[in-house]
Each structure stands twice: as C-alpha cells, then as structure tokens.
Amino acid sequence: MTSTSLWYILYEISIFVAVLPIGLRVLPAPAISTALLLCTWLTLKLLASSAIPMIMTFLGLNSFIGYIIIAAIALMLGVFLYAKLGCSHLNAQFTWTSGHLTSSVVLLAFVAFAVGVGLSRVGPFSETDSLVNFSYVLEWAKNSSSPYFMAYHYSSFWEVAYIPIIALGGTDALLWWPAAQAMALLAASVYVLALYLTNSRWLSWGVLAASITLPAFWFGVSGIGTLKNDMIYNAGLILLVVSLISFRLPEHRLWSAVLAIGGLSFLAVKYSGPVLGFGIMTAWISLGFLSAGVPEAANRTRFAILTGGTALLVAGHYYIKNIMFYGNPLYPYPLHIGAFQLPGVEALPKTSLLSRANDLALWTEFFKSPIYGLALPASFLLGIGCSLYLVMLGVKRKEIFNDALIGASCVLSVLIYAASTFSDWLGPSLVSVRYATGAFILSLIAIVITARSIGRITTLLAVSMLAWCAVVFVQSSIQISFRYTPSETVLKYSVYAVVVAGIAFVIANMQPRFRPATLLALVPIIILAGNQFTEINRDRYWIPSWKPIVAYVSKLRSGERIFLVSASDKLMPIYAGIGEEQNLAPAKYPAVGPSFRNTVISGRLPDLIDRLKSGESFTAIAVMTWQEADGNFMGRVVRDVAPFGYTTSGTSKYAVLLQNSSAKRLSRDISDTERASQ
C-alpha cells in the first residue's frame, strides 16, 4: 500500500460523509432498515463519485491537489449539513427496523460468500473492454482529453469515477473499489424492492440469494475486477423500479425522486438505457391513468419530467452532444425512426437474439450452459411468463399496479436485451446475459408475486426454485473462483470472509442508530483489505503473454517513457472524437505501471520511426496485441528500431519488448522473467 492510497481513502470517506445527511433527510420515515439506508446512501455517493470527476475533467482540473481540496470541502459540507439538517436528532428518532437473528444468520452466509468470491476476483484488469476503457481514463486524468472522447461516443459517466484513483490513489490495487460499490448498491436495491412487494424477509433473502450469486456478477467479462458498466446499469434498472413503486406513498415522494434520478442516470451509461427508462416511465404513467384517471397520470408525468430532466443534465448530456454534432443520439450507429433515418457510419451487425430466434444452435447453448445449467433458463423463461400474466391481470382488474409494473419492466427489459447488438453472444458461460441481469432479477420477483397470489403450495415451489438457482450459482462461482487458486490463498480468502461476515452479523444486531457510523468506519478497512488481496492476485490476472512487459515496467522507476506500437494489421476503427475516426491503440494500462507514473505514447510504426529520427528517446518500445501477432510485423519492428540502439529484451506470441541499450539494464533479464512466468 502506498501513502497516496490513504489520501484516496480520505477522499472516499469525505464523499460518503457529504452525502450521508442528505440520505438521512430523504429517507422515508418513520420505519427504515439498514438496506434502505444503504440503497439511498450508495445512490447519492455513486452519483457524486461520477459527477465530481466528470466536472473536474471538463474544467481540466484533475490533479492531486484538486481532489484533496474537493475532499476537504466535502468533509466540511457533510459536517455542516449533518448539524444544519438536524440529522443527529433525525437518526435517533427513526423507528429503525430491529435485527432478527435468523435474518442475521442469512446475512452472515451471504456476506461470507460475497467477500470470499469477491476477493478472489480483485486484481489488475485483463478483460479487453476494460483495458481499452482504461486507456481513455488515463488520458482524462492527465487533462489531455474530454470525457466526450470515448470509444463509439459512448457515455463515460461511469468510467470517469476511476479518475480519482489515478489522481489520489497512485496504485492499481484500488481499481476494484467502484465496481464493489455498484455491487453493494445492486444488492441493497434488490432486497428493498423484494421487501416492498412481498413484505417477507425470507422471500426477499431468497430473491437476493438467487440473483446476486449469478456468476456474471463475479467473473468473466463484467462485474468485480473489470471496468464495465453492466453492473451499475442493472442497478439503475432496479433503482428506477423501486422509486416508481414507492411513489404512491406521499411521504416517500422525495426519496422516490432521488432514486429515480440515480436510476435514470445509471441507465444512461448504455445506449439502451434511455430507451428502457422511457419505456418503463411510460408504462408507469399509463398504469396510473388506468387506476386513477387523468389527475394521477398528470402527477406521474410531472414526476417523470422532473427526474428525467435532472438525469439528463447529470448523465444524459452525452446524448445531447451526439445530437448537436451528428444529429443522432446513438451516433455512430444509424437510427431508424419510422420513415426517418438518423445518420450513422457504423452499421449494426445482425447479432441480436431476435434476429436469430429460429436458430436451434443458439437455444441449445442457452439451455446447456455448464455454468448455469437449467436453473437460469428455466427460471428466466418462467419469470417472463409470470411477468406477462401480471401485466394482463393488472390491466384487466385495474388494480395491483405495483405487480403490473414489475411485469411490464421485466418484459420491456427482455425485449430491449433481445433486440440489442451482441445479445446472441452466449457460449458456455452465456456471456450476453450480463446485459439482462436486471431483467432476470425482476423475473424472479414476478415468479414470487405470482406464486403468492395463487396459494401456499405454489409459494413453496417458488421458494424451491429460488433455492435451486442459488445453489447452482454459488457452486459455479466457488468452482470458478478457487479452481486454480493455491490452497494457502484460499485459506486467506476464507479467513477474511469469516471475519467480515462476523462484523456484518454484529452490525445487524447492534443498536440501529449506530449503524451509519459503523458502516462508514468499515470503508477504510474494506479498501485496505482489497488493496492487499489485489497484490496477492496480481500474477493470476495478467494476460500471460503480456507478463514480460508488465514485469519490466514494474521494475522501472516512475516517469519513464514507453512507446507502444500498434500492429498495423490488428487495428479496428473506433469513433472517439468529434468528427474523427480513430484507431484502437494498444492498452496503455500494462505499460503505464501499477502506480500510473510512466508516460506511454502509442502509434503506428512509421510514427515511431519519425520520432526516433527527430531525436526522441524511449526507455522501451513494446508491441502488444489482442491475438497472436504477425511474426513478420514483429520482426520488422525489431529490425527497424535496431539502428537507434534498441534490442530485444523479451518476446512472446502476443508481444515483443525492446529496451534502449543506453538505459540502465535491470538486474534480472526480462527473458528470464518470461520463462519463469511460463
């Protein structure tokens, strides 16, 4: 752990402190739970964690001193608001729901699983999209580009939250922390939603256990250990549904507005998000019209305009930018609206589930996943059927509109997922399901609601299905987590998981009014532990053929200059600038070093030669590719830079590293490191 890590911890605590009094003020009184507090607190905190660096980047103010000033202001603001809003008295006067021993035991088991599996996943980014995205984050942190400069003009509202880690943290051992918070927000919002609709702790725990244990949240191309927005996107979906369901109670209106703004902002990180948010809001307004006529529909419309407009300012301005410059919010993809076609330059491939609905091979993959078995497809399809039933029942009876909203939200989510690009990317691990985890959670809730409306036997069957899903998912997650992990490392995971689960058990049974302060005190403990386990896992998660370059960089003193050569035959076009077509440069993260201090320049081989001819010098030159490189091209790089004093220090089928012969040699030759890693 570096000393700068402590500054980042101080910054995080300051943001938590700043939003705590706001969260306590908007919480629906009189009865609240720890899950309700976490849901509200994390929503506000994650909004602030993205909005602050986004503004700092647009203003070009990213720096160590800048974020220290922000931390000081946030800390003072939190203390002032806590006193000004009377939060101490408010916290004491809340009728906190008391802890139950049985629920606490379930919480203990769940936390033990989450911590044990989660710790096995923290480590350096090695997933392709995460590596590409982080290259942009590195440029934003240096104030050398705008958050609008993002691959395919995507919204970068989630990715900018990683900038303070670079500016303050000074170590990549903290990169798991934003995703962990998104995971906690998703878990809290799922529990709150299930509790709202079932009024049963046990059913709520069952829904949580069957959804949050999904391997997609922990492994593969999304979740903990990646820089992906899938988790915060699905958390936004659940938050939006929670806010709309709680709107019916007048004392919940302010709280509902906060959650709706958070939900819509988090949904906006994907192109499908605004469409899904608009569809759910429209369904909610329509159900209000059916239940209470025009006045209720008008009331809901005002709420939708207010929260939607605020979310547009917070996270939706990326789409406004695309409209202003290109006339299409989803640029570079062409958008068809009736007879009109909005401009675009990147044709959408025919890779949606809907376009391949009659493909038997695709359905075979869906039902024969070795990771999910039949548990996910069976429960998902049943949940979709139950959702359709709830929608039809709600429209017919003109009541039970909360249930109908769950059904409508699930159906809309599934339809948008099935029509989305790359949704047919399944394979053994059902890769694209990560886009639809929010829909899957809603489908589980729909199953429980439908079963309870029929009788006790069906409720028991629904609980059995939840248990089946949980057992299958937990088993798969543990197998993936510990399959190639040394036994001594597994023991460390287990010991820490038991300790944290014990702390969670104590918090669940302590005096409720002390819970906010206790949860805040846990933040530095959790961050420091994750920092330590990242170092333990570091070698496990680097792409094997890149390890020679990583090993070389890790031994350099900070501030060295490294040139990354783009393999000319491995480039793919992206659209990342206003009117500019760029090329996907190699991932800068491995070369920039674990402390983000090296200067990394990327470009084609001719660009490198021109720089060398002009007298520029680099500590090292590297070629890193996403797949097996063309041996002729790598040989050409070696041959062309040799006259400038660069010799090969390490090679692999994916990479070649050349060191400046005039630079001080490392005590250990890099080729020895490569052979040891293999």
Image: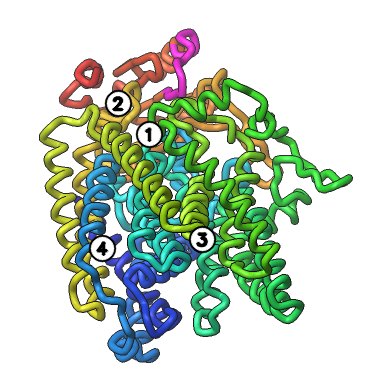
Q: Quadrant of residue 428?
A: top left
Circle 2 crowding by C-alpha within 10 Å: few under 14, some 14–19, many from 20 = many
SS class, disc 1: loop
Q: Earlier in the sequence, mark 3 or mark 1?
A: 1
Determine if residue 224 is in view: no
* Residue beneath disc 1: 126
Question: x, y percentage for residue 146?
Answer: 56, 53
Q: How many marks?
A: 4
Which of discs 3 and 4 lies nearer the camera? The answer is 3
* Residue beneath disc 3: 453
SS class, disc 4: helix
Q: CA distance from mark 1 to mark 2?
A: 11 Å
Pick the front one: 205 or 633 = 205
Q: Earlier in the sequence, mark 3 or mark 4?
A: 4
Q: CA distance from mark 3 to mark 1?
A: 46 Å
Q: Which residues are magenta?
A: 623-634
- Does residue 92 sit above or below 145 in this rendering? below
Q: Earlier in the sequence, mark 2 or mark 3?
A: 3
Residue at 54%, 63% (x, y): give it: 241
Residue at 46%, 41% (x, y): give it: 135
Question: x, y percentage for residue 472?
Answer: 34, 37
SS class, disc 2: helix
